[in-house]
Amino acid sequence: MTPLLWSLALLHQLKHQAIHVHPSSSTSTTMYNHYSSSWVSHLQIPWERFPLRLSHAITRGDRAHPEDRRSMVRIVVEAMQVHCRNPKRASCEEVAKIIVNRYPQTFADFTEKGERLGCGHYSLLRSIKSRVEHVNRDNTTHRLRQTKRTRNEEDYSPNSNATSPKKVRCLVDSYSCINWQPVELPEGETPASSEEKKHILLTIFNSEGPGAVERPDVDDFMCLTYISQRQLINSCPSLSVAVIQEQWPFLFTQKGLSNHFYKFTGIDISERLGQALITKGRRIVNYFSSQKLKWNLGIRTLIQQIESEGVLTNNKVGTATILLMMKYYKEDEDSLFVLADETSTRMSLEAESNLPITPRLIMLDDP
């Protein structure tokens, strides 16, 4: 390759990649230019200011000492505040990703067996965000959430006898939601038609009960009135859950809540929760089994019962995980489960048993 072509290739590489500098280098900072937040893309992490012991740990690929890690977080947050006095969680996460991706052996989250935990940067993100909140605890100038009034200021004239408007604080951050508060109604819909569909849904629920959520027209109407549901949920001041349930009862069924959550975040919560119970559940069961001797008699007995089942199916993993966690936190099984005969039905249980008012899982078993 000629020197000219080599130079062009190098310039192209530097244009599309980050310039990495070792913390022991004389160059003071590292510039990253491939992250989304505008100021994060210009953030320079002062590696050379890190404690000497931490720099040595990075070089050897060792874990950071807790004291050095706290010092590093303070230094990083100080550098972040040059660009933004009160960074949001999303920006803090980008910075945490930069650090962990650069030196995973030193800063990433690992289990005792060396398995990477989740995204790998959660603990560092939490430390950075906690530090940001700490240094801004008395700083009202740079708060991201602004106060809102319950009425327009123009409703109150200087000569009016009306009392001054009450200030309330509303949640204005949408976090990772993709459909926090839509502003446009679906095609062909009007506020009047949306209100009409709401009344139809209430009529159906009052006449047929929550089981009507499986009706196709109920599913369609709940989808078309999503904007009205979000307006009520996001209203300021916030309404109680009971008020929301009274106006949108189908929202409090499993299908209604799952569909709403999917439109809200783009995540199928039923599928995601099922996967989590299987993957994370097996990890929890394996952890308790590997530490069997350190647990009390109740947990050891439960572990023996689980192990006697042999290889756990996916359905049993979730149940075993919940039972182990309840034993660990000394929760009574009756607070979550109701044991009943396998021939029992919901109607027979409601007629024969004094069911508690709080939700329970009815477990059917042989008499």
Image (cartoon, helix red, strand yellow):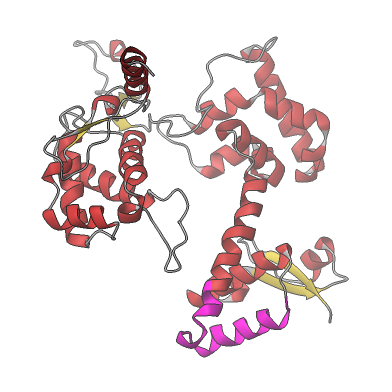
User: Picture coordinates of residue 331 (x, y %)?
Assistant: 52, 74
Which residue is more in the foreground, 300 or 249? Answer: 300
Name the residue nearer the viewer: 91 or 149: 91
Q: Is residue 182 left or right of residue 34?
A: right
Q: Is residue 197 above or below residue 177?
A: above
Give the quarter of the image for residue 175: top left
Range of the magenta residues?
A: 287-310
Q: In this picture, is 49 found above or below 143? A: below
Instruction: Determine the image quadrant of residue 264.
Output: top right
Taking the image as drawn, is residue 292 in sight? yes
Percent of width and height locating residue 340 = 78, 74
What residue occupies the far right of the structure in this picture? 343
Say whether residue 302 is magenta. yes
By secondary structure, the bulk of the magenta-drawn segment is best described as helix
Q: Residue furthest bottom?
A: 297
Q: Which quadrant is the C terminus positioned in?
A: bottom right
Residue at image location 23% in from the left, 43% down from the top:
133
Percent of width and height locating residue 130: 25, 48
Total count of labels: 0
Q: Nearer the viewer, residue 332 or 65?
A: 65
* Quarter of the image with the N terminus in it: top left
Is 338 situated above or below 136? Answer: below
Residue at image point 59% right, 33% down: 266
The x and y percentages for residue 68 are 17, 57
Decide whether residue 184 is among the magenta residues: no
The image quarter in which residue 95 lies: top left
